[in-house]
Image (tube, rainbow, N blue to C red):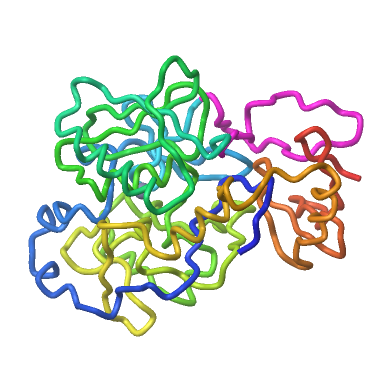
Amino acid sequence: MRKLKFLYLLPVLGIIACSKDSISENTEIENLPQENVVNQNLTEVAYPKSKGIVSDIYYAGQKLPVAEIEGNYVYQGDIILPKSKAASQFQELVYEQGKAPTNKSTGRTSGMWPDNTVYYAIDSDLPDKERVYDAIKHWETNTPITFIERSGEADYVYFTPGSGCSSYLGQVGGRQDITLASGCSTGNTIHEIGHAVGLWHEQNRVDRENHIRIYYKNVRNGMEYNFETYAEGGYDGKEFTSNLDFGSIMMYSSYSFSKNGKPTIVKKDGSTFSVQRNALSAGDIQGIESMYPSTDSTPEPDEEEEEDREPGYINGEYYTMFGVTVLRYYDLWYYETRHHGYRQVKLIDDFWYYS
Ligand SMILES: [Zn+2]
């Protein structure tokens, strides 16, 4: 994995085969009624009882289908997108030279937590706080991210009761809730923290057709949008690694959003697979280490070294920086515009401009 200074909101990086997919078939689950399948807690949902109204919004330069429920934009079941940073129409993320960005919030997200540090607070009304402490401990033990109880910091995660399990994606600024219904386990909490530090779901990778098939006929009516790939959503979805990680804690189960107890996601050979909500996989951890390089092993480079590292980008690879997916090509950056193909772009003061 490459270490990038400006890496923002990577899709989950499934890198290596830590997959536990071949261990067992889900025969018991298949015979259970749907409520019990949901109770396996292998698919987190923010509002288990509401479908909401589905529409497309633009967020961080991508068109995403969301359900509006109780005033929130819900994406893929358990991700809450901040309304203040979403738009109903496509908005330019790359600007012509000399034109100042008109709306600094839309299409951009701070995404990463500075200094590998996530501040948090726990609602005193949250039952079973141990699952939060256990999940945090798991993150701290396995990744370079530190969690510090908030003492007045402006940007923080707030663990609070809710109708399901949900989280925002990356650092969004201000208080951002992770909701945990009583049925949300420690593993579900690890998953939701994954969203809060910037991980997406694993099964919506642009190249997922190489690994899985979606059986839409078994998907609950109105829930099909949860299975769109990131590529279908717009211009993102360029993955940084080559393999889908079935062992990722961010992977949906074979029975996610099933309406009839039959699988909604199968491997290419038609078989179901197991997913887990026990621990970050080796691939999850490697992805996180790439997004949040350990400050111990990576001393802050001075300006010159930073220049030297620049050629480390790989020719022909896509990188997502400051909310925009750009292509590295012969030491230059290119952006795929909607109507005019690729245009060369430059990053100036954290904004992208056409060259
Ligand atoms: Zn999720």
Image quadrant containing the C terminus:
top right
Residue displayed at 39% across by 41% down: 79
Image quadrant containing the N terminus:
bottom right
Specify start and end residues of the magenta stretch as a single range.
84-112
Please state the horizontal and vertical placement of residue 255, each as a whole percent of the image.
24, 63
Magenta segment's dominant SS is loop
In this view, 336 is above or below 322? below
Q: Nearer the viewer, residue 39 or 309?
A: 309
In this view, 266 is above or below 289? below
Q: Is residue 130 left or right of residue 298?
A: left
Residue displayed at 56% across by 48% down: 292
Please state the horizontal and vertical placement of residue 305, each as a whole percent of the image.
81, 50
Residue displayed at 50% across by 39% down: 170
Q: Is residue 273 left or right of residue 241?
A: left
In this view, 124 is above or below 286? above
Q: Nearer the viewer, residue 36 or 110?
A: 110
Q: Is residue 103 magenta?
A: yes
Q: Is residue 330 left or right of residue 261?
A: right
Please state the horizontal and vertical placement of residue 105, each as a whole percent of the image.
63, 26
